Every structure is written in C-alpha cells, then in structure tokens.
Amino acid sequence: GGRGKTTTAIALAQRGWRLIADDRCFLEMDTPYPIIHGLYRTLMLHQDSVCRLGLSAGSQFAVSHEGKVVQHWPDGFGQPPAAPIHGVIAVGRGTEPPYGLRRLRPREVLRVCQEALGPCVQALGPSALIVRTMSRLSGTVPFWSLSLGWDLDRLENRLSDLLERSVVTVGCR
C-alpha cells in the first residue's frame, strides 16, 4: 500500500476515465474476454491524497488498519457493473523512470499478481483457485508495468497511447 495506485486512479476518474473498483473486484473468466466486476463503493486513501484530490471530508466514515481513510465512492464517478479486460497495467513506483511502460514476461506477471494478491492471500489463506485464475488471466491478456509520477497530463497521454494500441482496461497493483 501507499504507492499511489488509488490516488492515481481517482485523479484519472476526475478527468473522465472510468473507475470500476479500488481494492476489491471479481474476475469472470468464462467469456471471450475476462470481465472485471467492482465489489465495493468505497475508496481507501491516505489523508494527504484526500486533500490533494479535493475529496469531501464528509464522505469519510472509517480508518483502515493501515491508517488509510475509508470513504464513500465520490458522486459523479458512477460504478459500471462490469467491463471486459483486454489488458492489465500494473502501476506503482518501480525502479524504472516515471511513466516508463513495458510489457511483462510471464514470470514477471505471476510475481506482480502475487504482490497484488498478498493481502487477499493473507486474509483468506492460500487458494489454488486464486493462483489458477491469475495464471489463466496472464495467458489471456497482456500485462504491462507502468511506473507512476505526479504529472497527470503525461500519465494520461501514456495511458491513452497504450489504449490506442488495443489495451482497454487498466488494472492496478
């Protein structure tokens, strides 16, 4: 946590991008393309991100075990019930320069999925179904790694370029 994934996703949603889920979602794999379904209409952010994004303090209703503010989904974001996944972009503060985008190799995809699913596996215990689903997803759609930075125009341009090359849904690690 704390790498800027939710903050980046919300900043993009404020610019018109579609936000389906923050931390929890379901994957439906028995379709021509995998489908992602949002689970909760809540967001978890550090307080400085709430301020940076200009979100209403009145929509905060709890604090997570990590000290993040839990807040209601902002009005105007809507929540699409589902969307097809044509690719996954794992975002974070990596070792690459900001806005560096590269296709992940299969071994890297499994490592990224393990990192992203760490909290779920800790809470639910190891699950062969989780591992099989992520392995199947990695064989179905391309995975990319994108290093974050705070220049949202540059980030948005980078993502738009990739979308034009057929990656449609953005996922986060």
Image (cartoon, rainbow, N blue to C red):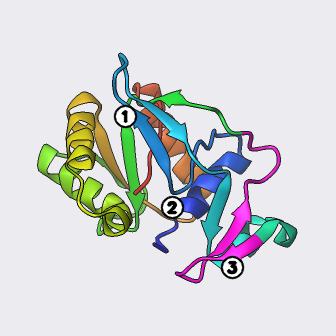
What is the C-alpha distance between the residues marked 1 and 2?
Answer: 17 Å
- Check contact, mark 3 vs mark 2: CB within 8 A: no
Label 2: state its secondary structure: helix
Horizontal side of 66 relative to 171 (left or right) equals: right
Q: Quadrant of the C terminus?
A: bottom left
Horizontal side of 72 relative to 32 (left or right) equals: right
Label 1: state its secondary structure: loop
Q: What percent of the width, then of the height, locates residue 112? A: 27, 56
- Look at 19% across and 51% down and name the residue there: 110
Horizontal side of 1 relative to 104 (left or right) equals: right
Residue position for label 3: 47
Name the residue type under label 2: Lys
Name the residue type under label 3: Gln
Mark toward the start of the polypeptide (1 vs 3): 3
Mark toward the start of the polypeptide (3 vs 2): 2
Mark toward the start of the polypeptide (1 vs 2): 2
User: Which residues are drawn in magenta?
Assistant: 61-78
Residue position for label 2: 5
Horizontal side of 75 relative to 20 (left or right) equals: right
Residue position for label 1: 87
Q: Can you say whether 26 is above or below 112 in the image?
A: above
Q: What percent of the width, then of the height, locates residue 171? A: 44, 46
Is residue 95 covered in magenta? Answer: no
Question: What is the crowding at mark 3: few (fewer than 14 residues within 10 Å), some, or many (at least 20)?
Answer: some
Q: Can you say whether 80 is above or below 106 in the image?
A: above
Q: Is residue 151 visible?
A: no
